[in-house]
Image: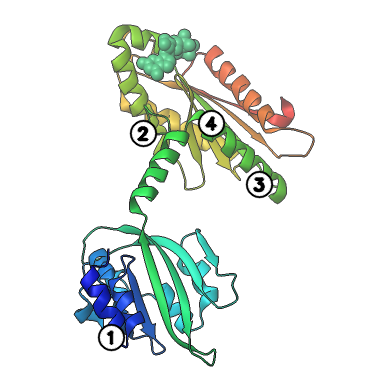
């Protein structure tokens, strides 16, 4: 809050507006048309940990926010580079629609002086002179780190399985639909693996439910280790996992499935009393070339049928079904 005495002093000063800006509780800085810092208010000092004396008259203000050189939002306005805002900032970006080239954006900032990242929302607007021409650009900042972290935590809760950290069933359903439609548009195959732990009831009986939980976590790690960037592995339910393999043929899916099967076997988690003596998985694989007349659910059913066959044939194996043959 402005101190009363400071406010009185400010109003008596010719540079009332400038003084007021310096005392604003909102972190604010102002650049001249050469991109040099004219004002760096106290709230901005507090937010960045950088004193005004260090940046005033320089164009080094980016260092207060980033480890590597890049323009701030105000620089984009000064340089007339507003169109680049989409490339330089996270998706939470919009251009000012008031026709005066103002910009609004949010992103994670390194905050080198503080030594910890902060999520900052910024607004940059031109200050115009009497003739309407731009004389400076003002940038205000809001620290939204706590809100952003809360949002990320909520999103995690909504999409992650609590035990394994994998995508949960809800996330799987949404991703499968999205990938199905993408494959339909791009006329690419979509493959799915259903991975089920063998004789897991026996494992639970022998090692207890907590032991069983730990086993599921180890298997989740083994399955994830075989994934590429665009693949999705989810906990489908209980001791069953599902793997979405976009743009993957049945042959490619079979290779991934076999690698997963081997990887779990190599964990050598003892499951005494079973044929193999170790924890193993059975995997059903299916591939579809999506068409408007069929649905993603059919792919799940087909992969499930293949899984059932793998179990029936003795477990610790993979079984393939091309959807067209199902
Ligand atoms: N520890 C633990 N066990 C679970 C969890 N979810 C499901 N299970 C157990 O997984 C077991 C699954 O048993 P079944 O469906 O009979 O299958 P299985 O014994 O693996 O036999 P096959 O699948 O035919 O090889 C049950 O005992 C469930 O209680 C979980 O989150 N943690």
Q: Quadrant of the N terminus?
A: bottom left
Q: CA distance from mark 4 to mark 2?
A: 20 Å
The quarter of the displayed image where residue 267 is located = top left
Q: CA distance from mark 3 to mark 1?
A: 49 Å
Eye-nearest disc, 3 or 1: 1
The answer to whether the residue labelled 3 contacts the one labelled 2, judged by CB atoms less than 8 Å apart, is no
- Element type where label 1 sits in the image: loop
Is the CB atom of the residue marked by disc 4 within 8 angstroms of ligand 1's nearest atom? Answer: no
The answer to whether the residue labelled 4 contacts the one labelled 2, judged by CB atoms less than 8 Å apart, is no
Q: Which residue is mark 4?
A: 170
Relative to 89, 254 lies left or right = right
Q: Which residue is mark 3?
A: 182
Seen from the viewer's position, the closer of residues 244 and 263 is 244
| Ligand 1 position by quadrant | top left
Seen from the viewer's position, the closer of residues 49 and 326 is 49
Q: Residues within 10 Å of mark 1 (few under 14, many from 20)?
A: some
Circle on res. 221: 2
Circle on res. 58: 1
Q: Look at the image and tell me whether residue 271 can be seen.
A: no
The residue positioned 65% from the left and 25% from the top of the image is 302
């Amino acid at each position: 809050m402005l101190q009363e005495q400071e406010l009185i002093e400010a109003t008596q000063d010719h540079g009332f507006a400038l003084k007021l800006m310096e005392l604003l509780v909102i972190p604010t800085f102002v650049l001249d048309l050469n991109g040099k810092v004219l004002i760096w208010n106290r709230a901005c000092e507090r937010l960045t940990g950088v004193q005004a004396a260090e940046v005033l008259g320089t164009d080094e203000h980016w260092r207060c926010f980033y480890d590597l050189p890049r323009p701030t939002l105000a620089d984009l306005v000064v340089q007339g580079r507003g169109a680049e805002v989409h490339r330089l900032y996270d998706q939470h970006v919009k251009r000012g629609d008031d026709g005066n080239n103002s910009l609004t954006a949010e992103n994670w900032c390194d905050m080198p002086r503080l030594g910890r990242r902060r999520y900052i929302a910024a607004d940059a607007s031109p200050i115009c002179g009497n003739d309407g021409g731009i004389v400076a650009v003002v940038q205000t900042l809001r620290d939204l780190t706590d809100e952003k972290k809360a949002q990320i935590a909520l999103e995690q809760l909504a999409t992650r399985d609590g035990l394994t950290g994998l995508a949960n069933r809800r996330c799987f359903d949404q991703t499968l639909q999205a990938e199905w439609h993408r494959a339909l548009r791009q006329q690419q195959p979509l493959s799915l693996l259903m991975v089920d732990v063998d004789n897991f009831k026996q494992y639970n009986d022998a090692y207890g439910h907590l032991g069983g939980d730990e086993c599921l976590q180890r298997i989740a790690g083994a399955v994830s280790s075989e994934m590429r960037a665009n693949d999705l592995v989810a906990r489908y339910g209980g001791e069953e996992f599902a793997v979405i393999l976009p743009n993957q043929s049945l042959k490619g899916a079979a290779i991934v499935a076999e690698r997963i099967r081997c990887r779990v076997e190599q964990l050598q988690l003892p499951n005494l009393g079973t044929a193999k003596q170790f924890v193993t998985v059975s995997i059903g694989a299916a591939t579809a070339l999506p068409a408007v007349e069929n649905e993603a659910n059919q792919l799940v059913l087909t992969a499930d049928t293949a899984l059932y066959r793998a179990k029936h044939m003795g477990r610790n194996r993979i079984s393939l079904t091309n959807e067209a043959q199902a």
